[in-house]
Image (cartoon, helix red, strand yellow):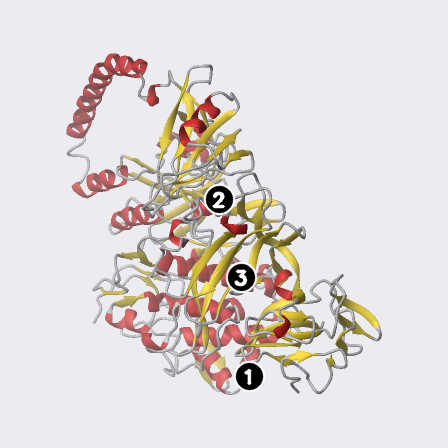
Amino acid sequence: MTVNDSLGVSQSMSDDSNGMTLVSKDGVFELGFFSPGSSMKRYLGIWYKKSSNTVVWVANRDNPIDFVSAGKLTINNNGNLILSQNDSVVWLTNSQRQALNPVAQLMDSGNLVVWNNGGAESNDILWQSFDYPTDKILPGMKVGWDLQRGLEWRITSWKSESDPSPGNFSWGLKLNSYPDFYLLSGKYKYNRFGPWNGLYFSGSPQRSDGYLNPYYEFRYVTSNDVKYASNMDEIYYTLSVKNNSLISKIFLRLTDQSLGSYVWMENTKSWTLFEFFVRDQCDIYGICGAYGICSINDSPLCTCLKGFSPKSPHTWDKGNWSDGCERNKPLSHNETFIKFEDVKVPDTTDTWLDENMSLDECRVRCLNNFSCTAFSNSDIRGSGSGCVLWFGDLIDIRLLEITPTVKQDLYVRVAASDPQTGSINTRRIVAITIPAILGGMLLLCTYFIYRIWRNFNEKSMTETDIERHTMDLDLPLFDLPTIAMSTGNFRLENKIGEGGFGSVYKGKLVDGQEIAVKRLSKTSGQGMTEFVNEVKLIAKLQHRNLVRLLGCCIEGQEKLLIYEYMANGSLDSFIFDHTKGKLLNWPQRFHIILGIAKGLLYLHQDSRLRIIHRDLKASNVLLDDKLNPKISDFGMAKAFGGDQTEGNTNRVVGTYGYMAPEYAVDGLFSIKSDVFSFGILLLEIICGNKNRALSYGNKTYNLVGYAWTLWKEGKALQLIESNIKDSCIDSEVLRCIQVSLVCVQRYPEDRPTMTSVIRMLDREMELVDPKEPGFFPRKVSNEATNQNEISLNNELSVTSLDGR
């Protein structure tokens, strides 16, 4: 039952069998009672009428209503909304103004407003939900501060899909002297936009008004557009929709600790992810430490600012940049400034600002204060104005990928005697040292030419090419004695795995860091190419769900890859072992499923090259000490540039049981063949069985055929492994089974992209009915050995097979 769009003093709305709700005038939003996910609690909330599972605001997120008796919403004569149960107040608003004929109205903006004097015509707001956001920002909402009322507009994540109470992540504006927006994990900074410089956020020039976004635009607003004036009323960030027929939303994603913007697509009746605000590893706060600068297009990601060097060179070279950098020369009273362009300026916590000072005056002010470490214009419009000074360490600087038309330059204080400053002393030092350096380089070149000549007959051209290519990578190179010592000279008891191209050993470096060493088999004829491929691909990949390559070793016939060590080994050791499988309950398995999906999405869409893995399987998913999944083994991966999404090969590589039909038979591979492999893996995680022969009735099927048969008979819950039955949510598991069957459909064009897979798993997209899967209803033979048949042994990796 719907009570139009408003609620008066004489009316109430109850959570009873009538299902009373308020619906905004044009039917965009709905207000009512709901239970999120699997929760048995009741909440008062607002959601999109077209997408009831997309809740945008919750009133009583800290104090839910139980099922003992129905909740009731009323408005009293003072203009306060009251949510009660059994005459006990659960939640209420706090308007202190005197009210006359107050009316609560749900607007088409999604704002629940209590109007004074009878309605919106009065234009007199007593209270509004937009002042108390939960986890989502709607067009017209604000993130920032109402300084006159002392009111902060901040969004905070839900604890879980079934619990809307405030979670660990929040996003808001810190009122530093030079204000800055932060995404926080608890009290720790996770991401920072960079301050507003008059034209754009320092770290996000692509989100300025000039950014070609067809859906919405962002604005940064201060009272009377006077920046940081002491008497201003408000300072906030908001968005507006360019096309009023579109509905737009931004919210904190619990699964990846990021803000993501979504747009409603009428043709598909679904939400489409437009962008994530935490785009890459350089967006993680302070990843390069003090005086370090992050560049996503470089490898390694972090370098020191000019005039600074790594504070801990040993750990820095191994990819741990948290210690940051330190000055080459200490400051005295003879300093200069180095200009840095195209950067996000540092964290503004310790800053001082004067909006009327010129840049020259700013330089003098910084130079005269020994604690000042950098300066910049605070407003870069026109010829630039305002002065901001930084004190203490400079943290969270990144090189911008998009060069803005108008730049905010950062001037960093260094000792004038530092060779990197370009001073007169520097030129003298250069004049003296260059001849010595050139002489040393000549000797080194002579030595290496001799080594190449001496080993020419001992090393094939293929191996020489490999060494040349890998040396071109900006990747730490380990020497063989160091790696041999770390693994006990590759002792058998340190062996933790074996694949088609060699063995994997656990090692421990002298600083205590644990590593995993992949040792390429010397007898693996085809393994050399895959080794180079894996180094070149993984060195460029940075994602929390991909295993991290720490370096490599190339000496003589030895080709080694050094990875971060994964304490819990591979996923297959859990899901295919009934005893160890008890350690992975359903919530943990669902977390692993989402992590694998996000890693695969990064490969397909978000990395610099589109990468098709071609060998996604349970043994190639590793688990760290917190059971976070990481995709590994890129030896068979294929990278594409531009818009290419598919290819053809006469050399089929991968693992039987995970191969898509078009790839195994005809050598056609694409992002959709990876989606097929993911579908198989998803079924295996749910069932605890490999994709091999299973008996059902009087027939024998592979796992896909077995799942398809049970799905058609309405018995899909029989697929759930006994270890997780007590911990799983049936509706969630059924959703995953349906997603898996959609992924393993026979034809690639019927399969979803990984973007759609994640949205379906996250309940942000309606599920589609699966069609008949590939390799079904073929009856399975346990003795299938012909190459024209697909073996069900998913332990067998295929490295060469002629496609027909």
Crowd class of label 1 (few under 14; some 14 to 19; many from 20; radius 10 Å): few
Mark 2 belongs to which amino acid?
Answer: Pro
- Asked whether 310 or 236 is in front, the reply is 236
Mark 3 belongs to which amino acid?
Answer: Phe
User: On residue 251, which mark appears?
Assistant: 3
User: On residue 525, which mark appears?
Assistant: none
**Which one is closest to the eye, mark 1 or mark 2?**
2
**Which image quarter: residue 717?**
bottom right
Mark 1 belongs to which amino acid?
Answer: Lys
Q: How far separated are the C-alphas under marks 2 and 3?
A: 20 Å
- Asked whether 154 or 149 is in front, the reply is 149
| Left or right placement of residue 162 versus residue 630 in this view | right
> What residue did someone put label 1 on?
715
Residue at 47 percent of width and 40 percent of height: 287
| Left or right placement of residue 217 versus residue 75 in this view | left
Residue 283 at x, y = what percent?
A: 45, 47
> What residue did someone put label 2 on?
195
- The quarter of the picture where the C terminus appears is bottom left
